[in-house]
Amino acid sequence: MLDFFAIFSKGGIVLWCFQGAGVTEPFAGPVNALIRSVILQERSGSNSFTHNALSLKYKLDNEFELVFVVGFQRILTLTYVDKFIDDVQLHFRDRYKNELEQKGAMKFLLNDFEFEDDFKSLLRDAEESGRVRNPVAMRNFTESQKSQKTVKSMIESKGESKNKAQGGKKNKNLYFLTLPSLLHRAKKGAFGGMFSMLKGLVGSKSLTRDDMESVLDKMRDHLIAKNVAADIASQLCESIAKKLEGKVMGTFTTVASTVKQALQDSLVQILQPKRRVDILRDVLEARAQRKPFIITFCGVNGVGKSTNLAKISFWLIENGYTVLIAACDTFRAGAVEQLRTHQRRLNSLHPPEQNGGRPMVQLFEKGYGKDAAGIAMEAIAYARNQGFDVVLVDTAGRMQDNAPLMTALAKLIAVNTPDLVLFVGEALVGNEAVDQLVKFNQALADHSMSDKPRLIDGIVLTKFDTIDDKVGAAISMTYITGQPIVFVGTGQTYNDLRSLNARAVVNALMKA
């Protein structure tokens, strides 16, 4: 049933692995994809991952810095896998506890982890339990955990109000420890010595979910208040819980400070994704190949696509590149005129006389009501013939639920294969950001003619100057796509375009 099971350290050393009968494909590819896309990107909120035809489930052991991964065919429904991976983790820890407690990474190389017989026994038991398990009956609301919590909060114990009223009265049954009594007990060995007791007070404590639950609930509410989408906030907190569970706290550290630091590190990691977009370098490479670099802008209505396209045009011509703007918004009245106004203003800032008589910015337009994909194709051909460095394709704003317009956008991108697809979104949105990005990506995938469809490559976040410290949309958008925020719009002028400072955004997000 299982394709493979692997146990490896967070440093990448494989301690033990199992490969199913008849499986010839190495498991390194799927496991490396899991590490790159989930574990390193702080996306551990869900313990499952899909890679081609395989489903992968994993569990982190933070105390011994281990990762347990199981892979099986995604068409199979294996109900026992979650419990099985827990059982393997506990059994492996118990059997090799002495070896795992040794210091340094060499312990993984010097010790021999013979685990095959134990693994097969656990697998056999798990498969048997999976066969005999009865189907779970649906619960009604009164049996649910939420109902129990609601009822529990309404029940007041008899002595509760009395105790509250007598809050200032001392309880005679309380037991106080004085320094002489502590020393006396330490000599007798009642506490295992003075220092062992103090050690229990300051650090050396393994974190559990119960320890973190109240802190994570507050963190979740705080993130939602800062405009992070509710689902993303929950997944982030779940990821932090998995990352810290079983980890030993440092000396004189609290649970709250440990969780907060882990969350800050995760947020910075999310805002610095695996793919970095360097437009100036890419334009230079395209120029060396004698072809224009093509950027397509997409997004919903009214987020500032045309305005930020003009800002990026200004930034490009400031760096010495010529720009052709393709007016492919053939629906909105005044869209072409707006771009023509930007073209005139930009050329007045960089007069043609200073550039050998050639304007730095030109507009390519065919009026209204035409096919946007065809206009973009003609604009790219014109730019190639005339030697332009960059083509900026402006598209019509469209709601993510508008199927005809989403199909037209997917066609434009599929036909013209731009080098960069930028999604323009507002910093003001919360949960809506997730819906927009998911549906834009889904539409591009559904209407693509390729096995590997072109999706959104980066994000331009607009109106960033209007939100104070409610910067959660940056987290939501980056988390959903895994793509970087390339630019941030911070005002009304051409100069108001910035790159994202991840640390500054996280500091604003964590500010009370």
Image (spheres, rainbow, N blue to C red):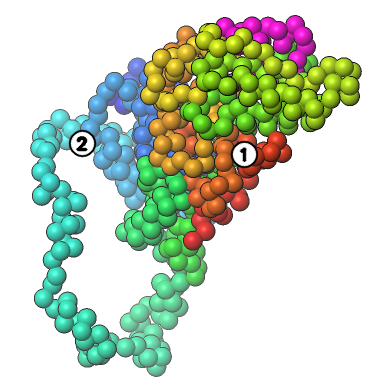
In the rendered view, does 373 fall on the left or right side of 217? right
Measuring from the top left, give residue 219's x and y in whole percent: 41, 55
Q: Is residue 172 visible?
A: yes
Q: Secondary structure at mark 2?
A: helix
Q: Secondary structure at mark 1?
A: strand
Nearest the eye: 337 or 29:
337
Q: Amino acid at mark 1?
A: Gly
Q: Please identify the quarter of the rendering in which residue 498 is found.
A: top right
Q: Is residue 184 magenta?
A: no
Sequence-wise first label, 1 or 2: 2
Measuring from the top left, give residue 448's x and y in whole percent: 46, 12
Measuring from the top left, give residue 2's x and y in whole percent: 31, 26
Nearest the eye: 234 or 88:
234
In the rendered view, does 156 fall on the left or right side of 403? left
Residue occupying image coordinates x 48% and y 46%: 472
> Tag 1: Cα neighbours inside 10 Å, few (<14), some, or many (≥20)?
many
> Tag 2: Cα neighbours inside 10 Å, few (<14), some, or many (≥20)?
few
Residue occupying image coordinates x 49% and y 28%: 301
Q: In the picture shown, does residue 41 fall above or below 146?
A: above
Tell me how far mark 1 sits from mark 2, CA to CA. 58 Å
Q: In the picture shown, does residue 291 fall above or below 173?
A: above
Residue occupying image coordinates x 45% and y 30%: 437
Image disc number at residue 489: 1
Q: Main secondary structure of the magenta part?
A: helix
> Which residue is denoted by mark 2 in the rendering?
125
Residue occupying image coordinates x 38% and y 87%: 182
Nearest the eye: 49 or 187:
49
Q: Which range is magenta?
A: 374-394
Q: Is residue 390 magenta?
A: yes
